[in-house]
Each structure stands twice: as structure tokens, then as C-alpha cells.
């Protein structure tokens, strides 16, 4: 008998079938935990985020719609949103200036770049991101992986929001060009 | 880039990254529908943005995480079902019953530890309750607002409690409304100490009540609401030297994220 798809498991979850959630955990916990850890930067917050993600899957009223994309992309979006909420909450409560991030923004080297190096596996997007300049990678990292707003990123670097947006625009265009190139090569 | 030449186009990246108020987002959606420059730019964004998450080193989750995550969820579900069985309730049908199930499952986050506490004194025969479960279809409570509460680790109080968290919610049933807060994995209160729950709106703080915590690390406050609650958009919990604080004197222990909205993703 074939294995149920992720979408079918989500339907079973709506019916309250616990084995379906267990199966989704077994299939995707590595992905969920890895994203949560990459964003949160430490195990306790990553664990908290994973708990919230699977609780959301179990209680969610917004069903997964297979016609709108693959399940893993949907799950990545949920995980990212939830982990960034957790991280922002933690940042607010720390109520201090994010010194590390401010230094990174000012000097152009430090933890985010190291993190990027560590995660630089042979995925197309990782290959494409090598073509970005350091400031372009930084803006992607702070916006996508760290959940800072454009305004916050601009303040960290002491530059106008327009400059950050232009950099982001250039970064996205470069990434797309390289992704399309890689696709054509294959 | 021409998008920067038009003031209306300025909000594109804020819109795409989910920033801004609902009003701003709706306003921008109208602009987007008629602007080819922004539409093209949004296309590039979507093509790339959804793939950024693939740039990732895959890690092995801690071995105990599966039991912790699923155990919490299923224990809560079980407790919810026991609650259903112990209520006398009117049968419901069709869509209402289906929605009811969602509401009951929405309760699971609070119920794993809260419900045994609240109902323990009259849930004397769990097996009997479980047996009768199938015959009793619940008209359940509804969670109107749910706040996830994150531990404030900078308080320095959670060094031995790496997994502390909690929830706060408004629970409505047919004839009553309750404000329920529960936390777990939190330090026990010493002497006259008390955890105090604060409701916040525009920086203004109102006390909602206090509770204590024993060695179990579990804290609960269930507040019947007879005359309504003040409006609030976030919840904070402090650890006070006693239960008589008019304003926080002790460290902040928990703070809310935005109210849960399951349709975000």
C-alpha cells in the first residue's frame, strides 16, 4: 500500500488521527528543527518553535491547500513565521540594542556570514547566493533569517531605507538570474 | 529602477515582507493590481523568496524532542476528550459539530495540565468517563483569543527551565467567560512570592490576577469574567515579591507574542 501524501496526512489530522501527526513529525522534523535553529540560533528557542509549529498543524483552521504549492514550502513558511515571532518576542524582552547585529551591519563580517558559510550546502539557492556581495547577503540574512524589518536593517547600518531596498532589489535580481542559469545548465 | 521613481511603489518590499498595517496592505494591493512595474518586481520576489529557506544545513533534532512535542499535544487532546465526556451536552450536528471539534482542539494547548487541575475533583472515574465519551457529543467552550507566552530568558530565572512557556486565552462557553492563563516549566514561588498577570494596551498595564507555582513548575490562573476585561493586545507575567503589587516590582517572566491566527501561513 502506498504511503499517504503530506496533504492526505493533513486531512487525517483534521479528523483527529494522531498517527498522521506522528508521521508528519517523522517526515519533516529535521527540516522544521533546522529552520527553527537557523533562525533562533539556539536549541531552547528552536525547541519552543518546533512545539508551536506542530501544535499549529494539529489545531490549524487554515488547511493546507495542495494546489497552492508543495507541502514542504508551506511548512517552511509556517516555521519561519512562528520562529521569527518567537525570536522577536525574545528580542523585545531582552530590551537591549542588538549589539552583535549592529556590529555585523557596520563591519560587514561576523556571525551571519559564518552561518551562511556553514549552511552553504550544494543547493541551487546556496550556489546562487555565492554570487551576492557581502552587503547583499547581509540584507537577505537579516530580513529572511533573522526577521528584522527593512526599517530596522536600515537603522542598524545607519543608512536610508531606500538604500536597503535597492540592495535587496539587486540581491533578488542576482539570485533569480543565477537560479535561472542553473536551471538551464541542468 | 523605475519602481523607486513612483512614490506609490515605495511600499512594495514592506508589502511583500509582510510589514505594515492591514490598511496599508489593502491600499498597496489596489496599487499592485494596476502597476506593471510592481507586479514584475513581486514576481521576482516570489520566485526567489520561497527558495531562500532551502539554503540550510539540515540538523538532527534532539532525540527527546519528538516525545516532548507530540506528548504535549496528545496529552492535551486526551484531557480535552475527557472534558467532553464529563460535560452533559446537547448533541450537535454537521458543520457545527465539525467546528466544535476544531474549538476543542484549539483548547488543547491549555488543557493538558489545566483541565485535570480544574476538573480533577469531580473526574473521579476516568475509565467510566472515557467509556462514555462516544455517547456524549460536546458543545464545547470556544477560545476567542489565544496568546502564546514565551519565557523571558533574560530574567535569569530560567537557567534550569529551558523549555518554559505558556498560554493565555479567553474561553467562552454558553453562559460564562473565563480568562485562563497557564505556564509550565517555570520556577516555583518562594515565601510570599506570586506570579502576576498584566494586560497591556498602548503601554497601559492592568493587573488581571496572581497565582503561585509549586515544585511541579506548573502555574494556572482561571479568572471568571463577569463584567468584561479591559481591552488589551498583549499579556505579560511578572514574578512579584507578594501578591499585592499595583505595578510590577519583580522581573518579567513571560510575554505574549501576537494573538494566534492560524490562517497566517
Image (spheres, coloured by chain):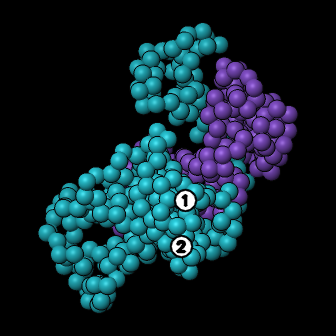
Chain colours: A purple, B cyan
Residue B41 percent location from the top left of the image: 57, 22
Dot 2, how many residues are within 10 Å of its Cα: few (below 14), some (14-19), or many (20+)? few
Which label's residue is closer to the chain start, 2 or 1?
Answer: 2
Q: Disc 2: which chain?
A: B
Name the secondary structure under disc 2: loop
- In this figure, which residue is indicated by the disc labeled 2? B192
Q: Judge whether A94 appears above or below B222 on screen.
A: above
- Between the C-alphas of marks 2 and 1, the distance is 14 Å
At x 36%, y 66%, the residue is B222
At x 69%, y 62%, the residue is B156
Name the secondary structure under disc 1: strand
Residue A111 percent location from the top left of the image: 81, 46
Is label 2 or label 1 in front?
A: 2
- In this figure, which residue is indicated by the disc labeled 1? B238
Q: Is residue A186 visible?
A: no
At x 30%, y 63%, the residue is B224
* A23 relative to A141 in the view: left or right: left
Amino acid at each position: 500500500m502506498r504511503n499517504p501524501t503530506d496533504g492526505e496526512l493533513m486531512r487525517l489530522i483534521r479528523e483527529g488521527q494522531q498517527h498522521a501527526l506522528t508521521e508528519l513529525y517523522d517526515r519533516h522534523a529535521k527540516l522544521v528543527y533546522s529552520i527553527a535553529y537557523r533562525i533562533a540560533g539556539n536549541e531552547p528557542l528552536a525547541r519552543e518553535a518546533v512545539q508551536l509549529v506542530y501544535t499549529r498543524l494539529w489545531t490549524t483552521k487554515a488547511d493546507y491547500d495542495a494546489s497552492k504549492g508543495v507541502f514542504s514550502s508551506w511548512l517552511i513558511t509556517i516555521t519561519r513565521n512562528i520562529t521569527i515571532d518567537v525570536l522577536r518576542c525574545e528580542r523585545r524582552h531582552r530590551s537591549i540594542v542588538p549589539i552583535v547585529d549592529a556590529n555585523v551591519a557596520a563591519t560587514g563580517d561576523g556571525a551571519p556570514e559564518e552561518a551562511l558559510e556553514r549552511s552553504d550546502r550544494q543547493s541551487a539557492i546556496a550556489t546562487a547566493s555565492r554570487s551576492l556581495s557581502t552587503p547583499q547577503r547581509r540584507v537577505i540574512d537579516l530580513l529572511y533569517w533573522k526577521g528584522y524589518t527593512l526599517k530596522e536593517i536600515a537603522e542598524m547600518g545607519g543608512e536610508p531605507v531606500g538604500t536597503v531596498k535597492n540592495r535587496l532589489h539587486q540581491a533578488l535580481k542576482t539570485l533569480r538570474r543565477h537560479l535561472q542559469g542553473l536551471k538551464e545548465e541542468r | 529602477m523605475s519602481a523607486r521613481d513612483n512614490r506609490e511603489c515605495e511600499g512594495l518590499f514592506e508589502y511583500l515582507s509582510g510589514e505594515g498595517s492591514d490598511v496599508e496592505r489593502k491600499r498597496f494591493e489596489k496599487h499592485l493590481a494596476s502597476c506593471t512595474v510592481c507586479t514584475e518586481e513581486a514576481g521576482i520576489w516570489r520566485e526567489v523568496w520561497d527558495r531562500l529557506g532551502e539554503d540550510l544545513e539540515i540538523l538532527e533534532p534532539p532525540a527527546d524532542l519528538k516525545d516532548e512535542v507530540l506528548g504535549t499535544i496528545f496529552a492535551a487532546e486526551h484531557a480535552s476528550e475527557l472534558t467532553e465526556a464529563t460535560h452533559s451536552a446537547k448533541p450537535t450536528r454537521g458543520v457545527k459539530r465539525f467546528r466544535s471539534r476544531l474549538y476543542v482542539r484549539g483548547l488543547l494547548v491549555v488543557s493538558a495540565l489545566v483541565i485535570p487541575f480544574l476538573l480533577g475533583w469531580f473526574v473521579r472515574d476516568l475509565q467510566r468517563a472515557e467509556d462514555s465519551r462516544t455517547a456524549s457529543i460536546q458543545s464545547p467552550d470556544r477560545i476567542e483569543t489565544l496568546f502564546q507566552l514565551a519565557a523571558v530568558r533574560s530574567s535569569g530565572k530560567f537557567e534550569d527551565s529551558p523549555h518554559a512557556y505558556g498560554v493565555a486565552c479567553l474561553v467562552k462557553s454558553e453562559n460564562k467567560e473565563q480568562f485562563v492563563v497557564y505556564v509550565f516549566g517555570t520556577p516555583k514561588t518562594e515565601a510570599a512570592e506570586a506570579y502576576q498577570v498584566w494586560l497591556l494596551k498602548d503601554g497601559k498595564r492592568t493587573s488581571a490576577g496572581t497565582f503561585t507555582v509549586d515544585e511541579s513548575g506548573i502555574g494556572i490562573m482561571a479568572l471568571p469574567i463577569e463584567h468584561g476585561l479591559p481591552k488589551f493586545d498583549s499579556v505579560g507575567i511578572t514574578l512579584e515579591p507578594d501578591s499585592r503589587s499595583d505595578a510590577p516590582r519583580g522581573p518579567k517572566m513571560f510575554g505574549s507574542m501576537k494573538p494566534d491566527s492560524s490562517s497566517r501561513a
